Image (cartoon, helix red, strand yellow):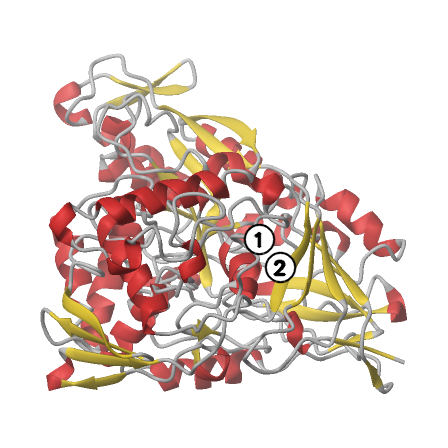
Amino acid sequence: MKRWRRKLRLAAVAGIGVVALIAAGCGSSGGSGTNSSSSGAPVKGGTATVALPAGVTNNWIFPFYAITNASTYNGNQFQWMFYRPLYMFGNNTNTSVTVNYPLSPAAPPVYSNGGKTVVINMKGWKWADGESVDAQSVVFFLNMAVAEKANWYAYSKGLLPDNVVSYKATAPDQVTMQLNQAYSSLWYTYNQLSEINPMPLAWDVTSLGAKPGSGGCSTDSAADGWAKCKAVYTFLTAQSKIASTYATSPLWSVVDGPWKLSSFNTDGNVTIVPNKAYSGSPKPQLTAVKFVPFTSDTAEYTALKTGGLDIGYIPTEDLAQKPATSPLPPANPLGSSYYLEPFFSYGIQYNQPNFNNPQVGFLVRQLYIRQAMQYAEDQPGIIKAIWRGYATTVSGPVPTVPSNPFTPAIQKENGGQGPYPYNPAKATSLLTSHGWSEVGGVMTCQDPSKCGAGITKGEQLKLTFDYATGIAAATATYQAIKSEEASVGIDVTLIGQSFDTIIGESAPCAPMSSKCNVQVFAYGGWGFDGPGMEPTGEPLFATGAGSNSGNYSDPTMDKLITETHTSNSMDVFHSYATYGATQLPFMWVPEPNPFGIQAITSKLKGVTFNPLFTLVPEYWNFTK
């Protein structure tokens, strides 16, 4: 299924333990002879054709954006290939979720002053126009973050840039930041510095053809209310809306990553080619990588079967039931022309209620209603019947696959279903005990004194889910949830839309606002691949967070999240995660990505799928 752009952080104590546990739990790809890539000698050149997930297109290139343009496909698998973040995460394996300093334009940060001072040293990379990826590139981004934090998907009140007292270039390739208190160095690296994306002076302009730096954002300050940065942001955002010019604009050709755009079509067809000025390593070996869109997974699979793709995914319905001891199917449905690789995803899936929606906000604010909806959902049944075992239960805000020390005990209860296992009788009991009874098959409030604040007599329990189309198993999942909720008197209407359309509606909104038109977001979930790389909750659950599309707000949750920023204690982290599992800021649904199966032509070597969705085709090569 598809994924919004998300990243959460990683707690200090478990930074090494997570990797070890993931490696032990997943291992390298293999088994049943299904993934044996060509052993022929590597050759330089060739074009690899890659399938985009059904219904997904890249539609935003400027790496400073609001939640409405935030997705893994715009970020980790598109922008990062051209514009390297300050620190890259993940590598060319199916297990790594840690920082990757060799692929980053900055050396490891240096913390001092008890964790209140951070020094960032740049490596001296070059932008494609010859400009240095230096301290000024970092200051430019930080200035933009201060000026436009309300429009930055990674912003969470009190965190970057709010927690930075001062920052400045202390040498041409060095930035020094003074923080407002001592933080865990691992948390700050994984969840704060990870969000910085150096930007070239070629972007510090307010018109095409203007002299680099003439916009003044890279040297702006609060003295003018950050007016220069605001003007530059307005211009760059407007340019990013003109997707048809991505491959030809003089702005977006100034890259520091291993790849640059060769062609871009708004229908989703995208071709990238090597950036010959790339300072890092390894250098790309392919001539080009071509990304191809599909409206359905059926069409994508047909292209795979007919040899029209070098890399694609096998729909769940075309796989044999997953063995208990292997992430791969017992047989390769494509035969020897392709080998198979698992795609483990470090994330969670959910249906996100909109607490500020004027039609249903007063309903979903009631914890007992969210509990009833969770009890009504048969995750084990959906996993077996629809996902053929290539999915896992989701029971709280922390991934359970791959295995990791962040998962609290409560999420492992009831066979991994957590505190609210499938139990329609409990769902019905919760509702009737709070003043509801079925009228015409739909739960209707009979006693407002029990139903909850804002709920009047005669109110019916009806909600609309906006779900992402294109994946047959995902559609079947939402249809099953609709049926299960109906069995306890909860009327769910499904509205299918493209993933891009739904995230375009996902900006946080004020209570009762006309902009809060979505009742429940059912676009997929969140991968802990940004903002932040540790599975804490500030981007999703903190009051006012940029990625908090459902407008959830709870002072206890805010307090528990804040405590994870400075403490390395697993007890502190588990307190947050346990509260999240019991409070249901989301209704959890099965996570299919941990066992996604990808097919790669036997002629292409070096292809793996990182749990953080980090895409690094510079490691790929064809063979003889």
Residue 22 in view of the camera: yes
Image quarter hosting the C terminus: bottom right
Q: Which residue is mark 2?
A: 389
CB under 8 Å between callouts 1 and 2?
Answer: yes
Quadrant of the rendered image containing residue 305: bottom right
Residue 393, placed above or below residue 91: above
Residue 22, placed above or below residue 149: below
Q: Which residue is mark 1?
A: 383
Q: Residues within 10 Å of mark 1 (few under 14, many from 20)?
A: many
Q: Residues within 10 Å of mark 2 (few under 14, many from 20)?
A: many
Residue 428, placed above or below residue 335: above
319 and 197: which is toward the camera = 197
Q: CA distance from mark 1 to mark 2?
A: 5 Å
At which x and y percent is residue 472? 67, 42
Task: Identify the residue at image location x=77%, y=53%.
Answer: 318
* 103 sits to left or right of 152: right
Q: Helix or strand or loop: what does disc 1 sit on?
A: helix
Please tell me how many numbered marks the rendered image carries. Answer: 2
Q: Mark 1 or 2 closer to N-term?
A: 1
Residue 401, placed above or below residue 318: below
524 and 47: which is toward the camera = 47
Q: Amino acid at mark 2?
A: Gly
Residue 191 in view of the camera: no
Q: Amino acid at mark 1?
A: Ile
At which x and y percent is residue 258? 60, 71
* 532 sits to left or right of 435: right
Numbered label attached to residue 479: none
At which x and y percent is residue 115? 15, 81
Task: Identify the residue at image location x=31%, y=39%.
Answer: 550
